[in-house]
Image: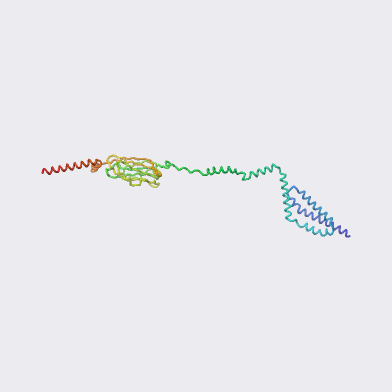
């Protein structure tokens, strides 16, 4: 009777061990195969089969008491999952084996192509050698630093503007008159608007700079300037030059206007205008003019002779009485 019970217990233990092993295979075997993704699934199955055969043999050869005691422990160990650290290490080992297998199976041409691609994609390989970089840097710097634009010359800075001047038709000896010269740099077409309009007006054009000097000269005149000789051209109104002129000799005499451009310290003549003024002498001014123009010695001798002749005439007049 005891033998029958022991045989039944052994059979029951084998059935329980088989069911537990099947459950373990269904739970863990698909995950290990899918996570490995390597061409060695047969080795895993063979190892699992060997483990199952070893467990079955050990269960059959064990005594009844050990089987009865080991059944609950086997069920507990089968029901408990494997530690996660061991599972991860196994997966990593299988992945490394799979990668090693694929690398060994890859042809040498593919590996060479990969090496060439990586070497070309390296940004350090794309850079030129240090000698070329140092030689190209000065050229780039010189191209970036362009020379400054040349300054315009003195002739390029000259501008053409209208000018006008006014002189009297005639003048009296030793009697002063006014002379006016005007330059219009405001953009107007004429500069005659700035003149008094009492004499003869002459208009024209001249090239001038930003600073202008106008001079008036005449050999037979005493000229006194009534305005600054050097002026900066105004964009708002006309520039005028005035002189007070006194004729010193009778007859027709010329007045000369000279226009100069001022460039820093240099004075450049630009244009010359000439007017003729007739100086008239009449009445007492004729005697004054004769006395001024005659030789002083002859005037003195003539005066003395006239005085002596008058004295003798007076003596003779009073001596007859």
Q: Choose top left, top right, bottom left or bottom right for residue 284.
A: top left
Residue 169 place in picture, x, y as percent? 30, 41
What number of labels is visible? 0
Residue lying furthest right: 1
Asked whether, in this view, residue 49 is left or right of residue 227, the answer is right
Q: Quadrant of the N terminus?
A: bottom right
For this rendering, which residue is in front, 74 or 150? 150
Residue 229 place in picture, x, y as percent? 35, 45
Residue 168 place in picture, x, y as percent? 30, 42
For this rendering, which residue is in front, 16 or 141? 141
Q: Quadrant of the C terminus?
A: top left
Asked whether, in this view, residue 61 is left or right of residue 39, the answer is right
- Colour scheme shown: rainbow
Residue 186 place in picture, x, y as percent? 40, 45
Q: Choose top left, top right, bottom left or bottom right for residue 207.
A: top left
Asked whether, in this view, residue 70 is left or right of residue 140, the answer is right
Residue lying furthest left: 321
């Amino acid at each position: 009777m005891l033998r029958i019970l022991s045989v039944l217990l052994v059979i029951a233990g084998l059935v329980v061990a088989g069911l537990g092993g099947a459950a373990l295979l269904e739970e863990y075997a698909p995950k290990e195969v899918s996570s490995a993704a390597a061409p060695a699934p047969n080795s895993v199955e063979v190892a699992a089969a060997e483990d199952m055969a070893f467990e079955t043999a050990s269960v059959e050869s064990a005594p009844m008491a050990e089987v009865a005691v080991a059944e609950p422990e086997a069920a507990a160990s089968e029901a408990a999952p494997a530690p996660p650290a061991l599972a991860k290490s196994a997966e990593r080992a299988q992945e490394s084996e799979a990668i090693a297998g694929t690398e060994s199976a890859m042809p040498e041409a593919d590996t060479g192509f990969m090496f060439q691609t990586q070497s070309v994609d390296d940004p350090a390989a794309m850079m030129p050698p240090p000698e070329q970089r140092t030689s190209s840097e000065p050229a780039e710097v010189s191209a970036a630093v362009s020379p400054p634009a040349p300054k315009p010359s003195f002739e390029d800075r000259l501008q053409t503007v209208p000018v006008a001047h006014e002189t009297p038709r005639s003048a009296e000896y030793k009697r002063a008159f006014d002379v006016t010269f005007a330059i219009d740099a405001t953009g107007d077409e004429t500069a005659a608007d700035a003149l008094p309009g009492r004499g003869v007006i002459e208009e024209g054009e001249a090239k001038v700079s930003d600073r202008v000097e106008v001079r008036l000269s005449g050999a037979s005149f005493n000229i006194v300037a009534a305005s600054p000789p050097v002026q900066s051209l105004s964009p708002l109104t006309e520039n005028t030059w005035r002189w007070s002129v006194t004729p010193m000799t009778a007859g027709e005499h010329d007045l000369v206007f000279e226009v100069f451009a001022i460039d820093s310290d240099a004075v450049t003549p630009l244009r010359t205008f000439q007017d003729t003024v007739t100086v008239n002498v009449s009445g007492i001014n004729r005697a004054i003019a004769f006395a001024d123009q005659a030789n002083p010695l002859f005037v003195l001798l003539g005066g003395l002779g006239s005085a002596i002749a008058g004295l003798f005439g007076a003596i003779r007049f009073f001596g007859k009485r």
